[in-house]
Image: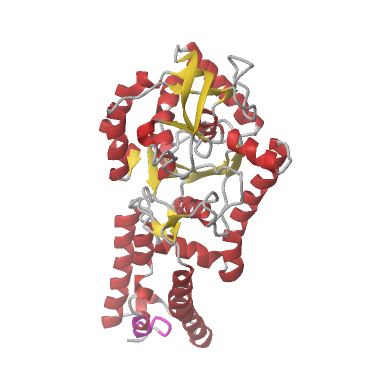
Amino acid sequence: MDEKNKFYVTTAIDYPNAEPHIGHAYQKIIADVLARWNRILGKDVWFLTGTDEHGKKIQEAAEKQGKKPKEFVDEVSKKFKEAWKVLNIEPSRFIRTTDKDHEKLVKEVIQKCSDKGDIYKGEYEGLYCTGCEAYYTEKDLEDGCCPLHKKPVEKLKEESYFFKLSKYQKFLLDLYEKHPEFIQPKERRNEIINRVKEGLRDLSISRTSFNWGIPFPLDKKHITYVWFDALFNYYSGAGKNHEYWPANLHLLGKDNSWFHCVYWPAFLKSVGFKLPKTVFVHGFLSFNGQKISKSLGNAISPKVLVEKYGADAVRYFVCRQFPFAEGNDGDFDESALVDRYNNELANKLGNLVSRVSGLIEKNGVESCELITGKQKELLEKYIGKIKSSDKVYFKGNLVPAKTREGFTGRISLILENPGNLSEIDFLKGTD
């Protein structure tokens, strides 16, 4: 495959322990926009999203409903697919970590890491957050609770197989220095670098305290740690024969940055696979200042929003409103959506389309080459604005995507003063 003509974009795969909310949709909408833009540019595009279906959290959620884990994830994963369809999000593949080809790959890469001497057996004791599926140290906690989920952690002790993450500290620091584009934006890269410099501990990659996961190929008493399993979805889902690998762009929230910026490249290096070009870390969507989250009970259904405003309005609002490219958080306010919908889409863009289509029907359209004088200057001004915004914000293939500024640049002729368009008499060809 021609690497220069390929664009492979991924999102984080979602944990289907509850129904999707607008925070999940935020990332998927941006990824879908990137995929569509690159197709317009003539790229061979592959867009991957899906669900992360193993782990203790899934097992517990299924047990609460009196269901088997596979039955439970089948039901909830379907709801994610339906939500993305309603939002006109069109992935090339919707991957599930229960897919047979993915399970097969995970077992193979564990064996490869073991053959390289990067896996050993030991015992792990630590503070575990089921919500994150991750261990924490005392200094990481806030009042004894997980800093993300705000819930008490468990003290666990179990036999485990470990990946020699500490072995890859120098490799990772060299990667960040030589390829600053690997982690974006800059603030997130600096956070990762500073933390890696403090030292890396070997990583527990198997579990015995629950049984819902991919069987660990080195020991039948163990199952595979969910993050080792989940991260390899990007490779197993990269086309029928992995032909789209390496990824051009991983999109993910800041709560997943450590796993993707540290564990993932170390795993890939161990196995001998190429590294992705860019891991782009965006902020959270909040609601009244709190992260939108299933666990916090403030989730907003994207399907409900689409029923009220339509898919295009929700997609437009997400791209127009929030500071995605800067990696900052954005506060979701439905009244702001209504304002954008009425002021920009209906009053400005909608009225313009109505006026222009009416004039075309009445007068027909002459060649734009007939436009002269001040009208030509005005038209060239707006065309220049659009081209300028393309160069500054889209950078050839929208990596990273300054979607909010890009949208503003492309529709500036409407947002700034739609009345000016009436001065361009392109419908009659007269000056």
Quick check: 64 above or below 22? above
Q: Residue at x 27, y 28 (%)?
A: 197
* Residue in front for this viewpoint, 197 or 37: 197
Quadrant in the picture for residue 306: bottom right
Image location (x, y in percent) of residue 260: 42, 35
**Magenta-colored stretch includes residue 426:** yes
Task: Count the labels in the image.
Answer: 0
163 up-or-down from 130: above or below: above
Quadrant of residue 102 within the rendered picture: top right
Q: Position of residue 293 (x, y in %)?
A: 51, 51
**Residue 365 in view here:** no
Q: Which quarter of the rendering shows the C terminus?
A: bottom left
In this rendered view, identify the residue nearer to me: 328 or 291: 291
Question: What residue is rendered at 33% in x and 27% in y?
Answer: 172
Q: Is residue 39 visible?
A: yes
Magenta span of residues? 420-428
Measured as percent of width and height from the top left, residue 183 is found at 34, 39
Residue at (45% x, 50% y) in the render: 38
Residue at left offset 43%, top offset 30%: 264
Q: Return the residue found at the far front.
A: 143
Q: Nearer the viewer, residue 240 or 303?
A: 303
Q: Is residue 47 left or right of residue 385?
A: right
Visual colour scheme: secondary structure
**Residue 303 in the image: x percent, y percent?**
61, 61
> Quadrant location of residue 376?
bottom left
Q: Is residue 222 magenta?
A: no
